[in-house]
Image (cartoon, rainbow, N blue to C red):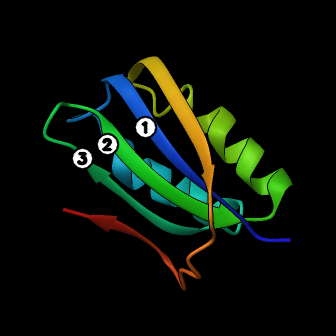
Amino acid sequence: MIRHYKIVVKGRVQGVGYRYNAQAAAHKHNLTGYVRNQHDGSVLIHAEGVEDGLQKFIDWCNTGPRLAEVSELHAEEMKPEGFKTFEVRK
């Protein structure tokens, strides 16, 4: 069953390659959706896929790439939207 999570990641998550590494992690776990920077300095992710892949991805998001410092992560389940790919949005 396909599930959808809206994930907001806060901390030092912009300017450290978070979005592109999130895209690679999403591809690794066969997820679709998107990632983008927010004006408040956080990163917004919408991710869809099977539960196991989503949980592994959320675990990755809680750490992020090497230079990131995640201080807070909020994941909320939502209705699936049927994304076809996982993309980095501006």
Label 2 crowding class (10 Å Cα cut-off): few <14, some 14-19, many 20+? some
Residue under label 1: 8
Vertical order, 47 against 84 (above or below):
above
Residue furthest to the left? 39
The disc labelled 3 sits on which kind of residue? Asn
* CA gap, disc 3 and disc 1: 10 Å
Q: Residue at x 29, y 54 (%)?
A: 36
Residue under label 2: 17
Give residue 35's position: percent from left, percent from top.
38, 56
Q: Residue at x 85, y 52 (%)?
A: 52
Cβ atoms at labels 1 and 2 below 8 Å apart: no
Residue under label 3: 37
Dot 3 or dot 1: first in sequence order is: 1
The disc labelled 2 sits on which kind of residue? Gly
Dot 2 or dot 3: first in sequence order is: 2
The disc labelled 1 sits on which kind of residue? Val
Label 3 crowding class (10 Å Cα cut-off): few <14, some 14-19, many 20+? many
Q: Quadrant of the N terminus?
A: bottom right
Cβ atoms at labels 3 and 1 below 8 Å apart: no
Q: Residue at x 60, y 66 (%)?
A: 27
Give residue 58's position: percent from left, percent from top.
64, 40
Q: Residue at x 77, y 70 (%)?
A: 2
Q: Secondary structure at mark 3?
A: strand
Q: Is residue 1 left or right of residue 56?
A: right
Q: Specify the quadrant of the image occupied by residue 42.
A: top left
